[in-house]
Image: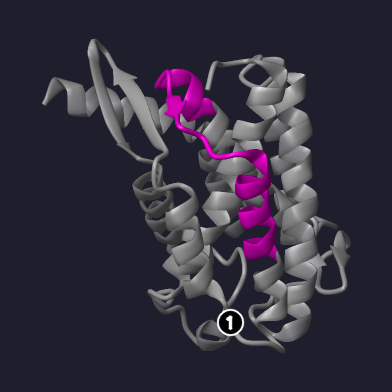
Amino acid sequence: MKTLFHFAYLQAISCLFPVMIFAALAISKMVSIPFLHRYDVILLLCLAAQILMMTLRLETLNELKVICLFHLIGISLELYKVHMGSWSYPEEAYTKVFGVPLYSGFMYASVASYIYQALSRLHVQVRSWPHPFLSIGTSLSIYLNFFTHHWFYDLRWWLTLLLVVVFRKTSVSFQVGSSTFRMPLVVSFLLIGFFIWIAENVTTFLGAWQYPNQQHAWSLVHLGKISSWFLLVVISIVLVIEQRKQKSVQPI
């Protein structure tokens, strides 16, 4: 039981950036600032959270570069998905581009921040990592499918099978106190994706964005979205691990 509580504590600390974004969503829903729209306030709070993470040295400059890359990945996906009507941001904002508020990139970046924090605090070691051609190639295919499935066959289940094959030998070990645990990497993809889906329900309830079925009243995000987050987590972890390998921050 002590180990479980310690693990929960380490996970909570690793989620500091996402928690600050949740706080920004909640605060902006309850408190209004004159001459600023809510989405603009959220952006300012997210920027303050990012500066705080750097000031407290909870993130390095190299990590910030990858996190900024996630901003671009996220914003690009948001622009396309909003255009296609997958979801929307109904409120007004000065910092809104083609219907997408700029703060939305921070929600993707917060996933990368969590991964970096968890790798460090849990002393994660990755074994039998596949060749970069396979790991990066699989990630790129997954990302492209988020775009192409609107006008071509949705390949997510074939891509899921592919990543299971590519990462079949890959496992992660992590340390909680004096205890060491190990699991297949694919299982960690699924677990993180599931918890992001839970977080997505909280963020949509707080009005971060809105799915078509939530326009009149909030409802639970469809369970099928877990598969989307599962695949998006693959992209996140692959980019983080490849960056750490190149910088030799941690042996893989």
Q: Of all residues shown, which one is farthest toward the top?
A: 178
Q: Is residue 203 magenta?
A: no
Q: Residue at 80% across / 56% down in the picture?
A: 102
- Is residue 33 at least partly visible in the picture? no
The answer to whether residue 216 is left or right of residue 192 is right
Q: Residue at 62% across / 69% down in the picture?
A: 209
Q: Hey, what amino acid is under mark 1?
A: Asp
Which of 224/55 is in front?
Answer: 224
Q: Which residues are magenta?
A: 117-143
Which of 86/34 is in front?
Answer: 86
Residue assigned mark 1:
154
Rendered location of residue 243, percent (x, y): 69, 30
Q: On screen, 172 above or below 120?
A: below
Instruction: Specify the quadrant that holds the N terminus.
Output: top left
User: Dot 1: within a 10 Å radius of its alpha carbon, few (fewer than 14), some, or many (20 or more) residues?
Assistant: some
Q: Residue at 35% across / 24% down in the picture?
A: 174
Mark count: 1
Q: Main secondary structure of the magenta part?
A: helix
